[in-house]
Image (tube, rainbow, N blue to C red):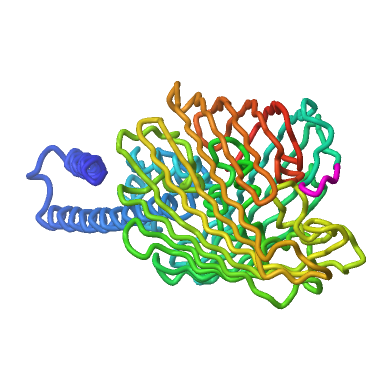
Amino acid sequence: MKLKQRTRLGLLVATACSAALLATPARADERNAGDVQGDVEALKGENALMREQLRRLDEQQRELLELVESLRRNTGATAGAVAATPGVVATTGVAATPLQSAPDTPAATAATEVPVTVPASFAEQATRNIVDRYQDGIVVWQTPHDASVPFLLKFNVNTQVRYLNSLDSEETFTDHLGGVHDVNTRNDITVNRTMFILGGYIFDPRLRYSSTVWTSAGAASIVIAGTIGWQFNEHLTLTGGYTGVPGSRSLVDTFPFFTASDRSMADNFFRPGFTQGIWAKGELIDGLNYLAFVGNGLNTLSLSATKIDENLMYSGSVWWEPLGDYGEAGKSRHMYDDYFASDQVRIRLGTAFTRSREDRFSNLDQSSPENTSMYNSDGILTFSTGAFAPGVTVEEATYEMLAIDAGLKWNGLAVNGQFYSRRVSDFSADGPMPLDSMRDHGFELSASYFVVPEKVAVYGRGSRVYGEFGDSWEYAAGVKWYFVPTERMWVNAEIMRVHNAPYSGTFTPYTSGLDGWVPMIQGILAF
């Protein structure tokens, strides 16, 4: 840029000098020495003025480049987004800083008309930053890092639309005591989940916040949750608020990037839920991550603070990725599938443990409890009256669950599995109990492969529960179509066979006693 400007200005100097010489009378001998000396002094003055204009132009050029770089780095402003300042020519359309005013001389006027040419690379980068307004979510606003009040506001959405048909199932099921219960079959289209998340940092990049609106049309429920956290470093971020209890791999930043679009039957039966608490998270050493959590209970989504008991719940998860990150950075970091089809083998080994003293959260004269976090393996709520013996109601019980998971990815192939072991003990009931503790265990296993890279994946999956009061199982096959070039949007078609589902959840495809073929078609957007 500087070379072009100096070349043009050099031509101007030469032109001005030539004009001055041509204006001199042809006969040099007719001029006196004083006139010649005056012309020389005039030229010196004009040269000095020209040098001053060159210096100012260089300063303005540096300021312009710094401005474009600042826009590229901090605000994503594009070329042409800022209105051009009068009196300035910018060939890229980027507004430049006005030139300093100068005496109204021919040299000064010529200097102000020199085009300021910004290199195309800067303009292209600035334009690209508008596209990059999507940065693992939509960046609504972000201040420069040196702003007096650093601020980032980012918007994310998870939306799941599902068609579910479970009409093939048996209409009733029988519990281990011989009681007969209805199976709630379905044939409907629902906006199964929608989550609006606003988050970022404020005042200091380490001060993190988020606000989430979680809705389920299927469950007719709305939850508004928030978090406040402080990121000390990559080894420790401390956060308080509403989140999933990390007792299962599916509750550690994976939703909705499972092999299928929903958690497995076994995972829904064994896993804890969502509650308020405080948690620490980070990477202890390269590849070794942890999440430690203290909260109010296994699942308090629909409970007011006045009904939550005084017992705290403890949960933690540790996972190791010795061959590198299991997934690409970003929201889909922990996805089960190998969407990006790296030819490098990656593995994940993890474990989690949860312990909680649970209360039924309802008076004994109510047969149905408000605590719906625990089911017996025959599909009956643990805290419902008659779950263990006729007329007997458990008021409190201790839940302990161990989960161990493993995964492998390579060149579009992904295999993931998890083992569960649950013990419920130390019952407090209003009558004699037929057992001192209840033990259940089970597993899930899935495999997926991209038959068309980053476009079409096929998968098979299954899970099983070996329970105190009965066993249950499922297997399924499906296909996922990523019809836009991103892992954040897909359509999923699946057919599954379920036998005696031990769990009910309105926003899951499972209901207690479900036994039959279940087809589903879903669309998921998670940006």
Height in image: 13 above or below 462? Answer: below
**Residue that sits furthest to the right in the current view:** 365
Q: In percent of the image, x 51 and y 25: which residue is there?
A: 458
Q: In percent of the image, x 86 and y 42: which residue is there?
A: 180
- Measuring from the top left, give residue 49's x and y in whole percent: 26, 57
Q: Is residue 347 left or right of residue 34?
A: right
Q: In percent of the image, x 57 and y 26: which residue is there?
A: 477
Quarter holding the C terminus is top right
Height in image: 32 above or below 338? Answer: below
Height in image: 460 above or below 183? Answer: above
Residue 86 visible in the picture? no
- The quarter of the displayed image where residue 478 is located: top right
Residue 79 visible in the picture? yes
Predominant SS of the magenta segment: loop
**Residue toward you, 140 or 454:** 454
- Measuring from the top left, give residue 374's x and y in whole percent: 71, 57
- Measuring from the top left, give residue 362's x and y in whole percent: 85, 67
The verdict on residue 159 being magenta is no
**Residue that sits furthest to the left in the current view:** 29
**Residue toward you, 189 or 72:** 189
Q: What stretch is highlighted in magenta?
A: 176-180
Q: In percent of the image, x 80 and y 27: which residue is there?
A: 167
The verdict on residue 179 being magenta is yes
Q: In this view, does 495 lie to the left or right of 48?
A: right
Quarter holding the N terminus is top left
- The quarter of the displayed image where residue 184 is located: top right
